[in-house]
Amino acid sequence: MLKGAFTVGAWTAASRVAGFARDILIAALLGAGPVADAFFVANRLPNLFRRLFGEGAFNAAFVPVFSGLLATEGEDVARGFAEEAAAALAFWLLVLTLVGEIFMPQLLHVIAAGFARDPAKFALTVTLSRITFPYLLLICLAALLSGVLNALNRFVAAAAAPLLYNAFSIAAMLALAHVLPTAGHALAWGVSASGVAQLALLYWAVWRGGMTLHLPRPRMTPRMRLLLRRMAPGLIGAGITQLNLAMDVFIGSLLPAGSVSLLYYADRVNQLPLGVLGTAVGTALLPLLSRQVSAGEADAATDSQNRAIEYALVLTLPAAFALAIVANPIMQVLFARGAFTHHAASLSAQSLAAYSSGLPAFVLVKVLAPGFFARGDTSTPVRVGMFVLLLNFCLNLALMGPLKHVGPPLATSIAAWLNVGLLSFMLRRRDYMRPDRLLFSRLARMLAATLLMSAALLVARTALVPVPGQHVSVISLSLLIAVGLAAYGGLAQALGVFDATRYVRRFTARLRRA
């Protein structure tokens, strides 16, 4: 499980780092004003549908069927199924794209209703959304090709493709920002161009893998009906997640101008540990749990669940405390330049601190959900998610007034912790999860190391950044990060949270073999 988590996490980390370079340039050119708000909504719209149709639910249903046909009935039958799925996906996404282009103003009145109070900002959002919306069609077809490559045990192209998104966005800003009406227009064209590039790269990789695909006439075959039946639970679950994201955009549009941008930059920083750790551990855990449950190894499955919780929290817990403590220095160093002022960075840091309070919960949800999925139970996480969605909406409405840009992230964090509590309760009640003494012992030692590290960070922050909100140098932030890493690493080693020397020996041995 650790090996799989490391592999997924490494590629995710590379994509996140490239994304940070892109976001730093966006902040410098667009800042936290109306153009930035318009672009972030325009960019969120196709990605919302992409996550709903193109990833997650579709791949979870497509890859097992395609892999099974490839193993049992041969390459020709598997290719035929992939072509049928591609044709159906392309047809319905083309219809959705055309409808979205035509009715974009009406759609944005629902997604970002608050923008309608500023006609110029709303018109810009409509224009940028129409430029970015074709990305939906392109990236969903790219997701299908990624599923084919993964089934063929070819992972490099599928993992590298997201880097093109960041590369094309950066290139578009540098080359077109001074040619087009705004830098937002340049970014929007870069997004759509990156969709073409990713689709081309993945099609080339599939062709190199000996699986040339064509688009036949869309048909509802028995295999397509099976695919749709398997997609249904995932679509419901993904729909709940995307409604949460759409709700954040809706609430942000009702807040003062620039709030959508402040939330975006804060969320991007918070997504680094969430994407690297949560996605990696959850992705590696599901197949392992599925095998153990299928083999009747209940004790092994319980042990895997407990160890996954440890792996998820060993870095997420200190990351949450560290992000809250050094949120302002991080946002100042990363984004406070060009059009993004120091004051805007301080406001965004407040949102980051609120997001970080829920970081361990966001990761734990990804670790606990496989406990249900591995046993064929897709309905319980969906029911819990629907309740949490309602709570999140109510909290957003209650907190957006008094807390402004801090309200939505704080509401999301509170809802995430409730999600963890409900999922844990359900797992315990069904005897799917039995925390052991080792888990409780390590969690207690993690918390002790984290609290002591936090004290060291507070002292270091006072010494290195005596005036909150002032200019922070890269050296000061680097020293703060070094203090946090050294304090937690040393304390965790001393308290027995992990044995660093064992991992160093394993890494050295692997290097020798390589």
Image: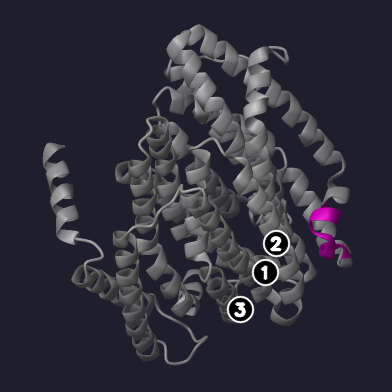
Q: Which residue is mark 2?
A: 248
Residue type at mark 3? Leu
Instruction: Give the vertical position of 454 relative to 69 (above or below).
Output: below
Q: Position of residue 270 (x, y in %)?
A: 51, 64
Between the C-alphas of marks 3 and 1, the distance is 13 Å
Are discs 3 and 2 less than 8 Å apart at CB? no
Give the foreground label among 3 and 1. Answer: 1
Q: Is residue 365 magenta?
A: no
Q: First in sequence, mark 3 or 1: give its number.
A: 3
- Crowdedness near tag 3: few (<14), some (14–19) or many (≥20) residues, C-alpha within 10 Å: many
Q: Position of residue 316 (x, y in %)?
A: 41, 63
Q: What span is in magenta?
A: 108-116
Residue at (50% x, 42% y) in the render: 162
> Could you say which is closer to the camera, residue 25 or residue 491?
491
Q: First in sequence, mark 3 or 2: give its number.
A: 2
Are discs 1 and 2 less than 8 Å apart at CB? yes
- Crowdedness near tag 1: few (<14), some (14–19) or many (≥20) residues, C-alpha within 10 Å: many
Instruction: Give the vertical position of 126 relative to 392 (above or below).
Output: above
Between the C-alphas of marks 3 and 2, the distance is 17 Å
Q: The residue tagged with tag 3: helix, strand or loop?
A: helix
Residue at (21% x, 67% y) in the render: 496
Residue at (57% x, 73% y) in the render: 354
Between the C-alphas of marks 1 and 2, the distance is 6 Å
Q: Which residue is mark 1?
A: 408
Residue type at mark 1? Pro
Q: Is residue 109 magenta?
A: yes
Instruction: Give the vertical position of 340 relative to 46 (above or below).
Output: below
Give the foreground label among 3 and 2. Answer: 2
